[in-house]
């Protein structure tokens, strides 16, 4: 089973691996396309006004914005993509505390959809960067660019493998699944949760890394901690598990 996952706004400052090159990412045949998107970002940093950069980064602090303007993502040191992100989902995943086999499963079974870098395998190299969700680089819209140029490659990577889509809704703009897949919706006290759903996406991914399900049947037999499946509904390609959070 493979998993589609969201990034996070907050990033770690890890920097232990070499700078980006043609082998840094999944889909190396598309490196030039990815490089094109990153060049748009780098050029925007150099030419945008302070106000434009404040909006791009989602920051008001002028000094922080100025520091980020000086960032060069092409020469910065990197770490694994799964280690770069530091939001709620990643806190609950707690990748660093998993055993080696569980980390290896995540490294090769999870695609993260970055606002800037597009679809990344969890083990791909990633420098520290900042780009607020939904922001464009002038007329350049990363989500439209990556959907146009990377969808076929993602389809080929998925193949016939079962898919669990744990992305937040925004990241569906980068890639649309056009084959059967599973997803999860989380309820607490009978109400759908949104912000804290990130925590449960992280917890679910951690459990998957430990259990390593090979198919949908394996997945449906996993006893997720503090989750009870209330209902399974099917609409077109999407099979949605409605999950109640229980204490």
Image (cartoon, rainbow, N blue to C red):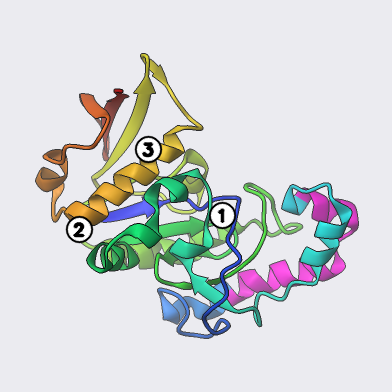
- Please provide percent x and percent y for residue 245: 32, 25
For the N terminus, the quadrant is: bottom left
First in residue order: circle 3 vs circle 2:
2
238 in relation to 76, above or below: above
Residue at 18% x, 59% y: name it. 160
In this rendered view, identify the residue nearer to me: 47 or 225: 225
* Residue, disc 2: 161
* Residue, disc 3: 200
Q: State whether residue 1 appears in this view.
A: no
Residue at 31% x, 35% y: name it. 184
44 in relation to 53, above or below: below
Q: Residue furthest top?
A: 190
Q: Is residue 110 magenta?
A: no
Q: Secondary structure at mark 2?
A: loop
* Residue, disc 1: 143
Name the mark on residue 8.
none
- Please provide percent x and percent y for residue 68: 77, 64
**What range is drawn magenta here?**
35-55
Residue at 47% x, 39% y: name it. 169
First in residue order: circle 1 vs circle 3:
1
């Amino acid at each position: 089973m493979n998993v589609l996952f969201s990034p996070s706004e907050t990033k770690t400052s890890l920097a232990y691996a070499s700078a980006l090159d043609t082998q840094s990412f999944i889909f190396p045949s598309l490196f030039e396309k990815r490089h094109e998107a990153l060049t748009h970002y780098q050029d925007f940093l150099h030419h945008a006004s302070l106000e434009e950069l404040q909006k791009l980064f989602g920051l008001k602090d002028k000094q922080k914005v100025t520091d980020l303007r000086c960032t060069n993502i092409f020469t910065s040191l990197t770490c694994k993509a799964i280690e770069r992100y530091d939001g709620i989902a990643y806190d609950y995943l707690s990748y660093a505390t998993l055993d080696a086999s569980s980390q290896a499963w995540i490294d090769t079974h999870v695609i993260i959809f970055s606002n800037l870098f597009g679809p990344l395998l969890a083990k791909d190299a990633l420098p520290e960067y900042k780009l607020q969700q939904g922001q464009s680089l002038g007329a350049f819209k990363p989500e439209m660019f990556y959907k146009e140029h990377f969808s076929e490659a993602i389809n080929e990577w998925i193949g016939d493998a079962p898919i669990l889509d744990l992305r937040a809704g925004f990241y569906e703009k980068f890639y649309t699944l056009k084959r059967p897949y599973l997803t999860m919706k989380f309820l607490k006290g009978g109400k759908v949760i949104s912000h804290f759903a990130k925590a449960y996406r992280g917890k679910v991914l951690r459990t998957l890394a430990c259990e390593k399900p090979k198919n949908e049947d394996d997945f449906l037999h996993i006893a997720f901690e503090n989750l009870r499946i209330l209902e399974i509904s099917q609409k077109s390609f999407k099979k949605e598990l409605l999950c109640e959070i229980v204490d």
